[in-house]
Image (spheres, helix red, strand yellow):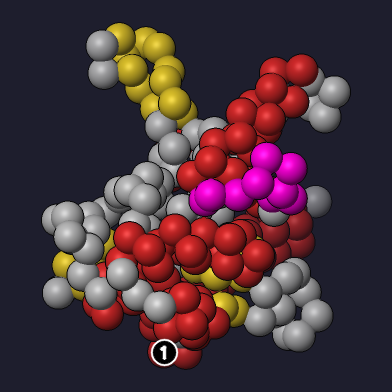
Amino acid sequence: MTTQSIFKGLLRPVLVSAVFFMALTGLAYPIFTTFAAQLLFPFQAQGSLIERDGLVVGSALIGQHFTRPEYFHGRPSMTLGADPQDPGKSVSQPYNAGSSGASNLGPTSQKLVDQVAARVRAYRQENGMAADAQVPVDAVTASASGLDPHISVANARLQLARVARLRQIADAELLQLVNDHTTARTLGLLGEPRVNVLQLNLALDARLPSRQPPIAASE
């Protein structure tokens, strides 16, 4: 068997197949999916970016760290960032999209128990709740990504009185705003009803501007 016949019989089909599938999966498929996404889901394809006054203030998919009392607050976040004083070290930087992750503390960890207990006390105090009042789990536990943009409906409603008082708005009016920004279960089956914190706070600012400077990329 000559070298030429070996090439035609064995190597040529292999090389042709390799080139074909590289072109198909490395070029044609990405181009097709990108075009289809831009055509069918332009908002999602661009990162679900949220704009206000022509400026991008965030994404509907990534939570932000709200701390001012006149805003609804998201879940705790355990993401880290570089220490400004020592780049070789890490410090707490909630909702850092460049460092998604959780604390990795197990359910038997005393450190986790202490963290949750401290969050429960702070949540009750911040929202004027009784010392033995139940607190939603999502209000005191971080998500696996540390970037969850949603909170439970129960969490939002427990914060409602605080926000209504500081914004000087009737509870019923603010409850309607929360309901307007509540997303139902996916396909009616998956997950739980949820509230996107960034979108709710932006709607809140649009209706009742804060007495402080307007919301930035993170507050």
Q: Which residue is mark 1?
A: 39
Reply yes or no: does residue 111 show up in magenta. Answer: no
* Residue 98, percent from left and from top: 42, 40
* Residue 2, percent from left and from top: 73, 51
- The answer to whether 33 appears left or right of 15 in the picture is left
Residue range corresponding to the magenta coloring: 127-135
Q: Is residue 6 above or below residue 53?
A: above
For the point 66% across and 81% down, the residue is 184
Q: Residue furthest front?
A: 130
Task: Compare residues 95 and 98 and report the one nearer the observer.
Answer: 95
Q: Is residue 150 above or below residue 104?
A: below
For the point 82% across and 29% down, the residue is 107
Quarter of the figure with residue 7 = bottom right
Task: Compare residues 151 and 130 and report the one nearer the observer.
Answer: 130
Q: Is residue 112 visible?
A: no
- The answer to whether 60 appears left or right of 1 in the picture is left
Task: Compare residues 35 and 206 and report the one nearer the observer.
Answer: 206
For the point 44% across and 26% down, the residue is 92
Q: Is residue 193 visible?
A: yes
* Residue 127, percent from left and from top: 52, 51
